[in-house]
Structure formats: C-alpha cells, structure tokens
Image (cartoon, grey):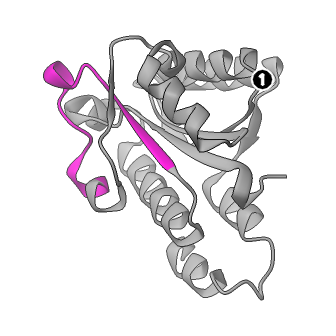
Amino acid sequence: MLKRDNTILVFIDVQGRLAERVDRSECLFGNLLRLLQGMNVLGIPVVVTEQLPEKLGPTRDEFQEFISGSPISKSSFGCCSEPEFLQWLENSGRNQVILCGIETHICVYQTAMELLTAGFEVHVATDAVSSRDPANKALAIRRMENEGVKLTGTEMLLFELLGDAKNPAFKSILQIVK
C-alpha cells in the first residue's frame, strides 16, 4: 500500500505539442490535473521533468499552478540518468514512487526500470500516462507489470493515500475526483 509519508509523484515530460499528440490527450490531462491537485491536498512531494525543454517547450500551462519548484531539464529518456533528479529523489527520503506523464513506452518505461533497479517501489498511474500510439502504451504497461511495477489509477491511488473517510482531506479529494 502507498503511504503518504513515503510517496512521491514524478510528473514526466508533459510538454507542448507532443502532449497534444498522445492518444486520448484530454482524458490524460484531466487525470494529470487530478493527480497534481490530490498530491497538493495530501502534502505529497512532486518532481517535474522536461525533456529538452528548449526544443519541446515547457510543461503545459494548465499544470503550472500546482507545481512548486523548477522542473528538472533532461536529455536522457530515463529520469535517473540526470544527477539533479537523483539528488532530488535522495533528498526526499521516500521509497514509493508514482509515475505519470508521457510517453509511456519511452520516458515513463525507462524511468520505471531505472527506479526498480535502484530499489524503489514503483507505481504507474495507467490512466495518467500515454503514448502517441496506444499499442505502444499497452506494450509498455505489460512490460512494466512483468518487471514488477505496480499498476494503479488516479482515483485508486488518491483514496489509497487518503486511507480513511474520516481523514480531514477526504472532502477535498472527493471534490477532485468528481
């Protein structure tokens, strides 16, 4: 089970026109927004990465108000190949990592494999990741699951982290998922 004091969210490369070209982008954007809002309500740290932002552009505007701190710029597909990301991860002191973003079969997949190798418990919000071709997303999710990544969904993980309807954050989370 995910624990609030041991979890972080990695928001991977939701940038510019590429984000608009992925399969079911509007559904993806809604779930990403719910994830960011939920992490803010629950006090869970979020790290944002951007793949070659000078070429692909910054993280999409609709997510900016829910992001604190500067995104980590990267050229590698897997986030763990960037020293700044590894430092952020180490400083968090947390071992459960939720991944979301794009593209599932490239940056999300490679980050998941790197994190597993490094000993982290990795969760992928399957409704908050996408690829341009849905077949690539499906293949990546199958491979990640076979390698030991835990599959989850946006609403499922928010309520898992909430834990109890008596939690003071319950009403806020309920409003987010409605």
Residue at numbered disc 1: 119
Q: Secondary structure at mark 1?
A: loop
Residue at point 48% right, 33% down?
130
Residue stretch in magenta:
46-63
Instruction: Pick the residue in front: 113 or 46.
Output: 46
Place of residue 104 in the rendered image (x, y in percent of width and height, measured from the top left):
52, 26
Residue 132 appears in which quarter of the rendering?
Answer: top left
Residue 119 appears in which quarter of the rendering?
Answer: top right
The answer to whether residue 11 is visible is yes
Residue 56 painted magenta: yes
Of the 4 image quadrants, the one containing the C terminus is bottom right
**Relative to 30, does residue 91 appear above or below in the rendering?**
above
Residue at point 42% right, 25% down?
84
Residue at point 31% right, 35% down?
19
- 165 displayed left or right of 19: right
Place of residue 73 in the rendered image (x, y in percent of width and height, measured from the top left):
30, 25
- 106 displayed left or right of 25: right
Place of residue 57 in the rendered image (x, y in percent of width and height, measured from the top left):
17, 31
The answer to whether residue 125 is visible is no
Label 1 amino acid? Gly
Residue at point 45% right, 18% down?
83
**Relative to 145, does residue 30 appear above or below in the rendering?**
below
Q: How many marks?
A: 1
Place of residue 52 in the rendered image (x, y in percent of width and height, measured from the top left):
25, 19
